[in-house]
Image (tube, helix red, strand yellow):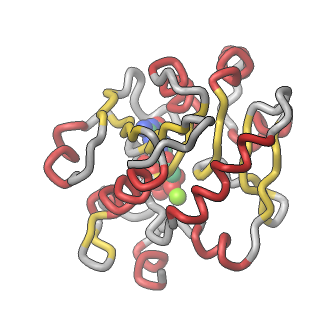
């Protein structure tokens, strides 16, 4: 484990989706012999001060995880990633959260460390730092400050559930995405995605 001094970053890995396009729980699917969730946990362990997995099913995943991870049981399952981030921000006390999907087989700790270092120079009013690619945010590989929580809660209270919509009204630093980072952000939603990653 490495502390990203002075900006301590905790990873929050989301593993509570329906996997409806995959047809089977994708957190458990093997990629090069390692379950997708375990792969993401390992990378997060290499670049974050602590790692949490938010899921309604901690018992399902405990046996496959080999690195130190805190499981957070989901209060309101399957309400989508924005609600999940809200619970994570309430329960994790570090200044920054690196939010990660569990379906990112090509995630790289070195690139993520470089992004973590950029947090140090971020002007105070900016509350998030998120990759932006082809006119879309990539919110499930992004950094969110604790101070996001009030804005997030009021967006949710007004019925907002769209990450893209929330980020459009937030002070967010865009992370530019080049070829290498686009490859890292490739997520697996279908069996075809997994086969071609
Ligand atoms: N904890 C938690 N994770 C979620 C939730 N919704 C989605 N995720 C996770 O967010 C990440 C990206 O979601 P998707 O790629 O859409 O995955 P999904 O919702 O399982 O799959 P589809 O049903 O095919 O959309 C995955 O790691 C999911 O497990 C949720 O309500 N709670
Ligand atoms: Mg996905």
Determine the image quadrant of residue 38. bottom left
Relative height, residue 162 to residue 113 (above, below)? above
Picture quadrant where residue 134 is located: bottom right
Residue at x 58%, y 70% (from the top left corner): 184
Residue 121 occupies quadrant: top right
Give the residue at x 74% y 19%.
151
- Asked if residue 148 is positioned above or below residue 103 in the image, the reply reads above
Query: Seen in the image, is 129 located left or right of residue 53?
Result: right
Q: What residue do we see at 24% from left, 76% from top?
A: 33
Q: From this viewpoint, which residue is outermost toward the left?
A: 63
Q: How many marks?
A: 0
* Residue sitting farthest toward the front: 5
- Image check: 168 left or right of 157? right
Q: Nearer the viewer, residue 70 or 14?
A: 70
Q: Position of residue 20 (x, y in %)?
A: 42, 56
Picture coordinates of residue 54, whole percent (x, y): 38, 35
Query: Looking at this view, is 31 or 83 the one in front?
Result: 31
Q: Position of residue 13 (x, y in %)?
A: 44, 44
Q: Is residue 131 left or right of residue 71?
A: right
């Amino acid at each position: 484990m490495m502390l990203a001094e002075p900006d301590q970053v905790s990873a929050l890995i989301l593993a509570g989706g329906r996997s409806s396009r995959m047809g089977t729980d994708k957190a458990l699917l093997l990629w090069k012999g390692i379950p997708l969730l375990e792969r993401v946990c390992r990378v997060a362990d290499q670049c974050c001060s602590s790692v949490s997995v938010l899921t309604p099913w901690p018992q399902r995943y405990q046996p496959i995880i080999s690195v130190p991870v805190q499981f957070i049981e989901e209060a309101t399952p399957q309400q989508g990633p924005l609600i999940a981030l809200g619970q994570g921000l309430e329960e994790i006390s570090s200044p920054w959260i690196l939010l990660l999907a569990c379906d990112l087989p090509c995630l790289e700790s070195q690139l993520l460390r470089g992004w973590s270092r950029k947090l140090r120079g971020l002007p105070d009013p900016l509350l998030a730092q998120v990759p932006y690619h082809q006119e879309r945010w990539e919110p499930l590989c992004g950094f969110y400050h604790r101070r996001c929580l009030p804005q997030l809660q009021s967006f949710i209270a007004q019925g907002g559930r769209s990450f893209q919509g929330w980020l459009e009204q937030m002070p967010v630093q865009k992370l530019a995405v080049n070829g290498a980072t686009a490859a890292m952000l490739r997520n697996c939603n279908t069996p075809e995605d997994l086969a071609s990653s």
